[in-house]
Image (cartoon, rainbow, N blue to C red):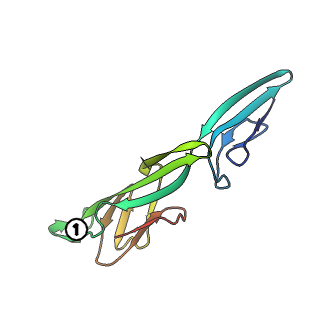
Amino acid sequence: YACASDAADVLSVNPASCVVSVSATHTQGAARAVVTAASGAINASVPLRVWFPVAAGLFVSDDQLDLVDNLQRAGACGAPGYQTADLVLSADFGGVGLATAADVVVTDLASFASSDPAVAAVAGSVVTGAAAGTAMVTLAGGASLAASV
């Protein structure tokens, strides 16, 4: 059997395994992308609708994580405790011929990193102050979205 896509700029199809994927080289969505599988005289086609992130924003519920009086950091005997804040990543999805789906929360699909974990530590989608200073929280993997804490 063999597989192919009629929209290589939207998604890829491995011709041998028929695995469909999108990657960093794909820069748009589409209202219709057809994947075709063929084996001898038998053909099957599946139309797909592919939304692509056209905009994204990283938000922090509180960008100032203050020292909390009489709070000690868990697991750090005697170390002062600081506030925590939630990180929220949202994206707008669209594509050629598609209406935009705005403000879709995609936080659970992302990983975050702190520019200085000694100042602000990130665990999942929660950032916790650790010491006085400034740190940037970014999408792990080098994406350009950031929030200052």
Q: Position of residue 34 (x, y in %)?
A: 70, 34
Q: Position of residue 116 (x, y in %)?
A: 41, 73
Left or right: where 75 falls relative to 54? left
Foreground: 6 or 69? 6
Left or right: where 44 falls relative to 140? right
The part of the image, by quadrant, that contains residue 115 is bottom left
Foreground: 14 or 130? 14
What amino acid type is highlighted by mark number 1?
Gly
Is any atom of residue 131 visible in this view? yes
Foreground: 63 or 125? 63
Label tally: 1
Residue drawn 78% across and 38% down? 15
> Quarter holding the N terminus?
top right
Q: Position of residue 33 (x, y in %)?
A: 68, 38
Residue neighbourhood size for the residue with mark 1, other residues' Cα within 10 Å, grouped as few (<14), some (14–19), many (≥20): many
> Quarter holding the C terminus?
bottom left
- Seen in the picture, residue 108 relative to 137 is either above or below; the reply is above
Is any atom of residue 105 visible in this view? no
- Seen in the picture, residue 42 relative to 8 is either above or below; the reply is above
Residue drawn 39% across and 70% down? 117
Left or right: where 86 falls relative to 109? left
Q: Secondary structure at mark 1?
A: strand
The part of the image, by quadrant, that contains residue 128 is bottom left
Q: Position of residue 113 (x, y in %)?
A: 45, 64
Residue drawn 45% across and 48% down? 102
Residue drawn 80% across and 27% down? 38
Name the residue that disc number 1 marks. Answer: 81
Residue closest to the far top:
41
Residue closest to the far bottom:
133
The part of the image, by quadrant, that contains residue 46 is top right
Left or right: where 67 falls relative to 60? left
